[in-house]
Image: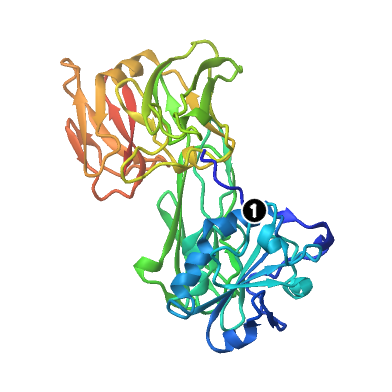
Amino acid sequence: MKHVLLLCLIFVVNFASKAQLTSGSLLSGQIKTVDIKGDSVDVQKWLAEGKIVVLDIFATWCGPCWGFHESGYLKNLYAQYGPDGTDQLRIVAIEGDANTSEGTLYNSSLGNWTTGVKYHIVNNHTFNSLLKISFYPTLYVIRPNQRVFEVGEFRSNDAMWKKAMFPTLDIDLFTVNGMDSKTFCNTVTFTDKPTIMNMGKKDMNNLQYTYSRNGVVQDLTVNQQIPVFSNVTIPIPTIVGLNESTEFEVTLTGANGEMFSEANRLSFKSSYLRPVLNDNTYKIKFTTDLYPGQTSWQLIDNKNNVIMSQSYRAGNSSNGAGGEDANKTFTYDVSLPTEDISCIRLIITDGANNGMQFFNAATQPTPGVEILKNDGTVIKPVLNSDYSFTNTRTIFTRFEKTSSADDIIATGFSVSPNPASDLVYIKSSFEQVKDYTLFVTDIMGRQVTPHLPNVSFVDVLSFVPGLYFVQIITKEGSASFPFYKH
């Protein structure tokens, strides 16, 4: 959505056969020279003194390099942690292109690279081999023990910078990739596996975690070396042919034989949902983010007929932010054709290829799609995957027409609130239906309450968060009502 500066990788043809220093490796050579002011630069001396060193290898013609330079991030780091701050940090910017002169630092086509810079700037390409420069910009954080972290895709992530420079824990885990949530009509393959990076002070030789599928928990261990600044993907099983709504959760509980505190545990959750409609009329609630003009969607049936489509108005600012349609929830009434409809797809398209991620979670509604029955029952809540995508996101809904008797029962009872946190209330509009029995099942179909005759509420406070179903049985028919427990 937001038109931010693209800090992409600019590949240098002459370096194509090399690869940058691997995160977790040790700096093996000397970086000793003078900067453009004639001041001494001695990286090994600084490291021996206990300083953190940041290296910014750039080229004066490199647009993404200039964009990062102009962000002022390194200037701010140096002011806070350099000699005039806490004196924990040294920064060296190295112009690494042998074909550009020192003069271009002052008058390149992009601007003056020296303006306002107090840290060292070096015009010396001879360190490219030692630093294995394969693209510009390349940014390294080097700890006093000479352990190297290649910042790469995390250059805009302040938390990652701070963890790389100033570790506070022996084991400090950072999320590289989490777990996604999905919807499906028939079957789906579960493939999500979280990836984490060790950003602490010590290497790990094992990692303990729990893996939960619909509340059934297994205690597992990754038995492998996980050095500082290296990644590990948690080896949870791939499930082929998943055909029912399922909740997954992975929690990292300890490493090197010691348990993490609750505050330092990482948890990952994923909902694989199979939303089912029993009526050909229902409601869609669609919530936009800050850039509504870049978002559109289509509702398509299994015959590729477009049932509904919608786009939104951009704001009046130069990048389309804001406006009347921004961070707003729209409600639509949907009517499906009754012939041979089995699967409905809602396809969201984002024109800027970065999803609908621009919103304030504390003050604005979460962008995404909520699908509701006409009585307000939520069959598909907003998921994090609704807004966290690039170009497109597809949301599936299964359509299954109920029998006439069950249909009557389904419209005569209601279950609220949905989602629920403590009590779920059951209301009936049938004066003639005096007797009914209900019980609650989880998404695996397991019964989690006894049969309860003619009750008006169910206490769900102790339920594990997830999707549940209130099953109501009468002499005339039966019906199932989904709800989510917070």
In the depicted structure, whether residue 241 falls above or below residue 292: below
Under mark 1, the amino acid is Pro
For residue 118, what is the image quadrant? bottom right
Give coordinates of residue 18: x percent, y percent. Answer: 80, 65
Q: Residue at x 44, y 27 (%)?
A: 276
In the depicted structure, whether residue 343 falls above or below residue 288: above
Q: Is residue 394 left or right of residue 325?
A: right
Q: Residue at x 58, y 47 (%)?
A: 5
The one nearer the camera, 444 or 437, is 444
| Quadrant in which the C terminus appears | top left
Q: Residues within 10 Å of mark 1 (few under 14, many from 20)?
A: some
Give coordinates of residue 430: x percent, y percent. Answer: 19, 17
In the depicted structure, whether residue 452 falls above or below residue 175: above
The one nearer the camera, 422 or 413, is 422
| Number of numbered discs | 1
Question: Which residue is disc 1 drawn over?
Answer: 64
Q: Residue at x 25, y 44 (%)?
A: 421
Give coordinates of residue 53: x percent, y percent. Answer: 58, 77
What colour scheme has been applied to the protein in the rendered image? Answer: rainbow
Q: Is residue 72 left or right of residue 470?
A: right
Give coordinates of residue 147: x percent, y percent. Answer: 61, 78
Q: Is residue 238 left or right of residue 94?
A: left
Query: Element under label 1?
Result: helix
The one nearer the camera, 486 or 92, is 92
The one nearer the camera, 347 or 349, is 349
Q: Is residue 42 visible?
A: no
For residue 264, what is the image quadrant? bottom left
Q: Is residue 222 visible?
A: yes
